[in-house]
Image (cartoon, rainbow, N blue to C red):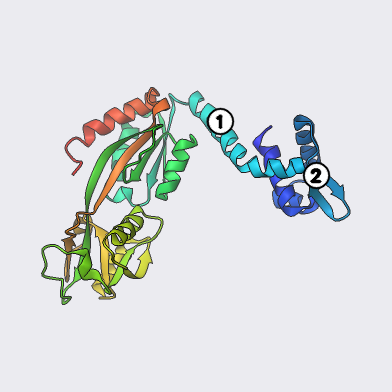
Amino acid sequence: MNTKDLKCFQTVFEEKSISRAAKRLFITPQGLSKNIRQLEEELHTVLFRRTAQGMVPTEAGLFLYGKSEQILRELEGLEHGLRQLEQRRERLRIGCANGVLNLLPLSLILEFRQIHPEIRLEWREYPNDQVKERLLNSQIEYGFIIGNWEETTVRARKAAGCRICLLVYQGHFLYGEDRVNLSRLQGEPLLILNEDFRLYHDFRALCVVHGLVPNIVGKTADGAGLFRLCSQQVGLAVVPEFFRDEFKMEGVRIIPFEEELRWEIYGVSKRETEGYETIRLFDQYLLERLKGKEE
């Protein structure tokens, strides 16, 4: 069984028609029918009854469809893992969670490529959970995520971190405070990064613990947008402390929370790939460059 035939089966099951499924897959109906027959022969069972009303799944077809998504993930993980094994000395794919490169500069990654030109280094940003998924599926070799990861098959090392703070505009009653308690935000219009960022979920979870229902009036993927909206007095912004260095604090102040909410970056790799030369070299490089910079 291969991923191509299984995806063909899924599409026919969902469309209940060879012709509609073929259009969706951009292949010919004849080619799709052949793929389905090959899968049936391989499994020694009939997956569909061909009727005038369309392709009706048999009991075996219903069973396979229920298992197909899990099987696809396992097959794709196997394929990615084998390719990863073949290229373990020449390629390093890095996934960065959205927002990581604000505190962990891209130059840190690019410098490694200059030091090791023999390694084909690739990097890309994803939502935090997608970095984890891609690491487990062997689609990347190394990841930078927000927040620690309690996963037995993964090794996580803290790389950098800062406090989560409140950006307050001049004239607001909290502007002169040294620290802010969450309870004082009840009913206050709040601005925050959107659901693609770990900060959003951590802040919402902290609010639940402290019995606060946050009045979030704006969500964005753009840190500069948060700063601008706060400066325009649309609301108070929940931001990482590195904003202090990113923007001129004119007419706004960045104030830590009393609850000590933190925004922390972890470097992660699978334990089974620790011996790969590319990962060993990258780990050693990070250890030297980030020494003493965790806080």
Vertical side of 208 occupied by 157: above or below: above
Judge left or right: residue 128 versus residue 25: left
Q: Residue at x 32, y 38 (%)?
A: 267
The local crowd at label 2, few if under 14, some if 14 to 19, many if 20 or more residues have their Cα within 10 Å, is: many
User: Depth check: 205 or 250 in front?
Assistant: 205
Query: How many angstroms separate mark 1 from mark 2 (CA)?
Result: 28 Å
The amino acid type of the residue labelled 1 equals Leu
Judge left or right: residue 71 versus residue 233: right
Disc 2 element: strand
How far across and down, in percent of the image, does residue 88 sit? 45, 25
Q: Which residue is mark 1?
A: 78
How far across and down, in percent of the image, does residue 37 sit? 80, 37
Vertical side of 195 occupied by 9: above or below: above
Q: Which mark's residue is nearer the viewer, 1 or 2?
A: 2
The local crowd at label 1, few if under 14, some if 14 to 19, many if 20 or more residues have their Cα within 10 Å, is: some
Vertical side of 254 occupied by 289: above or below: above
Disc marking residue 43? none
Closer to the chain start, of discs 1 and 2, is 2
Q: Residue at x 65, y 44 (%)?
A: 66
Judge left or right: residue 25 versus residue 41: left
Q: Quadrant of residue 237?
A: bottom left
Q: Residue at x 42, y 43 (%)?
A: 131
Judge left or right: residue 35 versus residue 150: right
The quarter in which the C terminus is drawn is top left
How far across and down, in percent of the image, does residue 97 sit? 37, 47
Vertical side of 55 occupied by 86: above or below: above
| Disc 1 to disc 2: CB gap under 8 Å | no
Q: Residue at x 72, y 45 (%)?
A: 62
Disc marking residue 48? 2
Residue 92 in view in this figure: yes
How far across and down, in percent of the image, does residue 218 sit? 35, 69
The amino acid type of the residue labelled 2 equals Phe
